[in-house]
Amino acid sequence: MKNKFLVIASVLTLSVSTIPNAHAQWVKLNGSDQGGNGYINALAAIDSTLFSGDAAYVFGGGSVWRSTNSDTTWTLVDSGLIANENNSVNALQVLGTNLFAATDSGVFRSTNNGTTWINVMDTAVSSFAVVGTLLFAGTEHSGIFLSTDNGTNWTAVNIGLRYDSTAEEYWNVDAFAVSGTYLFAEENGFFLSTNNGTSWSNVSDSFPGNSTPNNLAVIGTNILAGTNYGVVISTNNGTSWKAANSSYAKLSSVNVHAFAVVGTNIFAGGFLLDTGGVIFLSTDSGASWTSESLGLPYVEIRAFAVVGENLFAGAYGTSGFPFGEVPGGVFSRPLSQMIASSSVADPKATSPEIQSYPNPLSQSTTIRFTSAESGAARVTVVNLLGEEVARVFEGTLSAGEHSFEWDASGAAPGMYECVVEMNGSVQQVPVMVQP
């Protein structure tokens, strides 16, 4: 199992009025080593609550911790989890009010901010992706599973993925990335689905320098892969790749574990043998990079989350050469120390956030969204070929919350996209029509 946390095209943002410990370099949060060596694999957030997931290690681990003040107090929240030295928390994912933990023992779900957990899948899971209300889980040897009902039920979606006939199993699915209606997965190769996992096509197998992807991210029209030899980039949906390390020589030696996209900026975090924890910043979609590692000890950066105007980094502790045992934990630094405030804003801040309920549906669904500004809008439903099957609304809308009903009684069973176009933005949510 590769212990890592996946950050895809969006990052988690918490609205908090004040974050203590404003500083000009990375500072470790009190108590964030979680009573041990702080082998942090994952970060996630719901509202103003920050969660971290740790890896299994010899004295315990495999747990989730919670902080409501992002600085001084961390509480172990593992009731219902299988928390032991053999069960790493490999990823955390928020979907609505649900928090999911991907572990070596399966997927666990909490509906009460981590206070209690239930097991919703028994297969070992390495990674998550969310497309609208759809939750994808990348497993160790069983391919990819899809849940359309917040993890209650799961369906294998493996058509086109690589299958090892000798071992009679799939390769590990260690990373996802989402770009519009495109869903990418790393499974001993780079695979693309344009129909929400119904089928997959192998886009490419080779990466520069025989590097191995650890994680994926999308910024603009570029796809980035964090590898054991720095960052590689594709500008053609993964068909070809090139190294993105030329602007900073040391980046080619970094084992990159995590990405965070913040507005028009992207951070890459990982480990460099001679210095330990490193974080690099690109303000041009991965074309060039600068180091933002000041204050980090000899640890491995495994995860990111954005909290208000601060970037949080989850670090995996190290031991042995050259500094002995160095605990990990959660580190924080103001974004304003690293990037201009004008480029920090969430590019979706004035865009409608779409929801569809019920989903899946058999007769009709209600499409809800909120827009920060008034303007011309069009709400349509398209099939997987991009062909319009229904025009639900076209006209002018005021700022605020809106809802429209799509009567799908005449639609053939299958996957569709509800599309909202407003004020120059286009967003969509996948919906499934059942027989």
Image: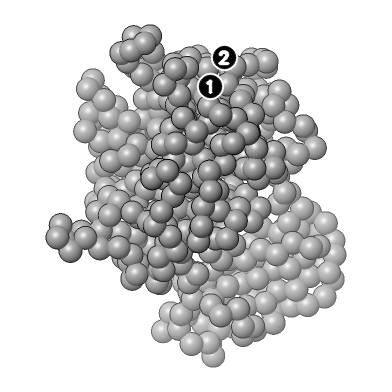
In the rendered structure, find residue 295 and report the number of the disc placed on it: 2
| x and y, in percent, of residue 181 in the image | 56, 66
Residue 174 visible (yes or no): yes
Is residue 62 toward the left or the right of residue 270 in the image? left
Dot 2, how many residues are within 10 Å of its Cα: few (below 14), some (14-19), or many (20+)?
some
Q: Position of residue 67 (x, y in %)?
A: 50, 26
Q: Earlier in the sequence, mark 2 or mark 1?
A: 2
Question: In this view, which residue lies farthest toward the top?
Answer: 323
Choose top left, top right, bottom left or bottom right for residue 292. top right
Which quarter of the rendered picture does the N terminus lie within?
A: top left
Helix, strand or loop at label 2? It is: loop
Whether residue 7 is visible to the viewer of this picture, yes or no, is: no
Q: Which mark is residue 134?
A: none
The residue to which callout 1 is attached is: 331
The relative height of residue 47 versus residue 174 in the rendered view (above or below) is above
The residue sitting at the bottom extreme is: 410
| Quadrant, the C terminus | bottom left
| Location of residue 214 with respect to 67 vertically, above or below | below
Residue 28, given in percent of the width and then of the height, sits at 52, 16
Residue type at the position of mark 2:
Gly
Residue at left 36%, top 39%? 90
Of 12 and 189, the residue lying toward us: 189
- In the depicted view, which residue is nearer to us: 239 or 348? 239
The amino acid type, in three-letter code, at marker 1 is Phe
Dot 1: few (<14), some (14–19), or many (≥20) neighbours within 10 Å?
many
For the residues bearing labels 2 and 1, Cβ distance under 8 angstroms: yes
How far apart marks 2 and 1 lie (CA) works out to: 9 Å
Please tell me which residue is depicted at 21% across the width and 60% down the height of the picture: 164
